[in-house]
Amino acid sequence: MVLGGETGLSAGRTPTIELSASRHALVARTPVRRALPQRARRTVGAWCFADHMGPVSPDSDPVGIGPHPHMGLHTVTWLVEGELLHRDSLGSEQTIRPGQLNLMTAGGGVSHAEELTEQFRGGLHGIQLWVAQPDATRWGAPAFEHHAELPQVELTTGTATVLVGELAGTASPARTDTALVGAELRLRPGSPLVPLETGFEHALVVLAGAVEVDGQWVTSGHLGYLSPGRDEVALGTTDDSRVLLIGGTPFGSPIVMWWNFVGRSRREMADSGSEWNAGAERFGETGSPMARIPAPTPPWRDPVG
Ligand code: MN
């Protein structure tokens, strides 16, 4: 498929990647670059949150994240370097290492902690993303999956690991509640074509190195957005690079996000925060030795909406 020109789709304009800067934040003493959400772009498919963590060296003393709740979302954790111990209210206790996927489904309520492990003393580098659950499953049961091995797709100059969904006909075994893709592309110098699902919107988050797309360089600290209608993208690199590709069908429902919750109204958010602070059963117990993180007070004057 050819975009632009006489297809009339974009009236002679070639497709252009849209770059926006991530916000810098500190999470558990670890610097993160928050690529999603952004004011002008809340979601990419059902992806609604993307924190690129680190890289930090061991002497920066990262601390892990104590027990906290989630609702209405899946957490997707992917490490480039380091090791974390995931504990959740389902009784899961799972160490995650680079190349492995942790996928937790919150549904109506879950809690977890992400601890540093005793034995690992290296740096930390990775990404944690959230996927908004659709109305059909967002009040459903929580769940946890760990995938130690994931399918790969060979590119002309690189390899794609399929975390969720499907890329080039290769499907991940991980759960998806909406049409979605998430893949890590490890690229050597070159310009491989990566096939895309035409009905999806996509975005790139560069974890290391840099990629050239539509004549613009995308580096860490930016979200590179690709609107629906593309069936492939060329990713030019001159140095070894690592990029996360996310995408999906534009999310149908307007979502509300606050603290660790995804829902549809401020009332849902505020009530969930109060219930966590009151020790409500819906969020369970993680068994983590770390201190629970209390929900803050919502910033809205009137939490009904
Ligand atoms: Mn979490």
Image (tube, rainbow, N blue to C red):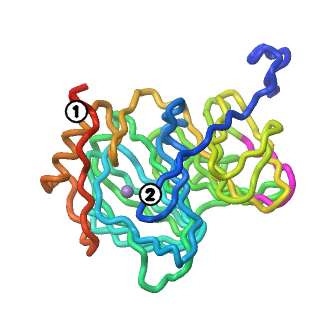
Rendering coords of residue 50 (x, y %): 51, 48
Rendering coords of residue 305 (x, y %): 25, 25
Rendering coords of residue 163 (x, y %): 57, 55
Rendering coords of residue 201 (x, y %): 61, 33
Q: Give the mark nearer the N terminus: 2 vs 1.
A: 2
Q: Residue at x 22, y 31 (%)?
A: 303
Q: Which stretch did the figure color magenta?
A: 187-195
Q: Which quadrant of the rendered structure holds the N terminus?
A: top right
Q: Amino acid at mark 1?
A: Arg
Instruction: Provide the secondary structure element on which disc 2 rests.
Output: strand
The label shown at residue 267 is: 1
Q: Amino acid at mark 2?
A: Leu
The correct choice, above or below, for 67 with respect to 288 in the image is above
Q: Nearer the viewer, residue 288 or 102?
A: 288
Q: Residue at x 52, y 42 (%)?
A: 36
Asked if the beta carbon under badge 1 is closer than 8 A to the nearest atom of ligand 1, the reply is: no
The correct choice, above or below, for 57 with respect to 54 in the image is below
The quadrant holding residue 226 is: top right
Whole-angstrom CA distance, mark 2 to mark 1, is 27 Å
Q: Nearer the viewer, residue 20 or 282?
A: 20
Instruction: Give the residue at mark 2.
Output: 103
Q: Is residue 99 visible?
A: no
| Lateral position of residue 222 relative to residue 93, left or right | right
